[in-house]
C-alpha cells in the first residue's frame, strides 16, 4: 500500500475510534488496545469502500483487528491487487 493511502487509512481509523493517529501502529490490536467494536468496524469498512472505491464483503469485518490486517483485506479485495 502506498504511503499516502496508508496515511489516509490511519487517519480514517483514528477518527472513527476517536484516538490519536500516533496510537495506531501496524500491529496495534484495535479491539483490545483501542476498544473498537463492531459498529466502528462497519464505519471503517464504509469509509474504506468510499475512499478506495472497492467492495469488501461484510464477512471480512472479523479480520479488522489491526492496521496490517485491514491493509491485507483491502489488497485482497482490490481489483488491481495491490493498491
Image (cartoon, rainbow, N blue to C red):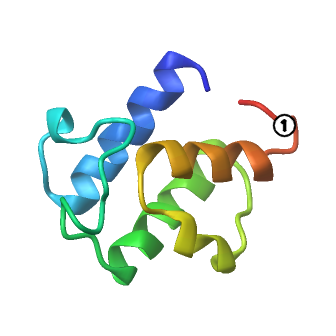
Quick check: 72 left or right of 22?
Answer: right
14 w.r.t. 34: above or below: above
Q: Please give left or right for residue 83 compared with residue 43 in the image.
A: right
Q: Who is closer to the viewer here, 6 or 26?
A: 26
Tell me: residue 63, above or below residue 29. below
Quick one: SS at disc 1? Answer: loop
**Residue 59 location, x and y as percent?**
67, 79
Q: Residue at x 79, y 45 (%)?
A: 78
> Camera-side residue: 24 or 14?
24
Left or right side of 45 for 7: left
- Quarter of the figure that contains the N terminus: top right
- At x 84% / y 37%, what residue is drawn? 81
Local packing at callout 1 (Cα closer than 10 Å; few below 14, some 14-19, many 20+) is few
Measured along the vertical axis of the image, is residue 47 above or below residue 31? above
Q: Residue at x 26, y 41 (%)?
A: 24
- Disc 1 target residue: 81
Image x and y of residue 6, in percent: 47, 30
User: In the rendered picture of this protein, how many numbered marks are placed on residues?
Assistant: 1
The quadrant of the picture occupied by the C terminus is: top right
| Residue 2 position within the rendered picture, expressed as x and y whole percent measured from the top left | 58, 19
Which residue extends farthest top? 3
Which residue is more in the foreground, 79 or 68? 68
Amino acid at each position: 500500500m502506498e504511503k499516502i493511502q496508508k496515511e489516509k487509512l490511519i487517519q480514517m481509523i483514528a477518527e472513527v475510534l476517536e484516538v490519536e493517529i500516533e496510537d495506531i501502529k501496524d500491529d496495534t490490536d484495535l479491539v483490545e488496545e483501542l476498544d473498537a467494536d463492531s459498529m466502528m468496524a462497519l464505519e471503517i469498512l464504509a469509509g474504506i469502500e468510499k475512499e478506495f472505491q472497492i467492495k469488501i464483503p461484510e464477512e471480512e469485518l472479523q479480520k479488522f483487528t489491526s492496521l496490517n490486517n485491514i491493509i491485507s483485506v483491502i489488497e485482497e479485495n482490490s481489483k488491481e491487487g495491490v493498491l
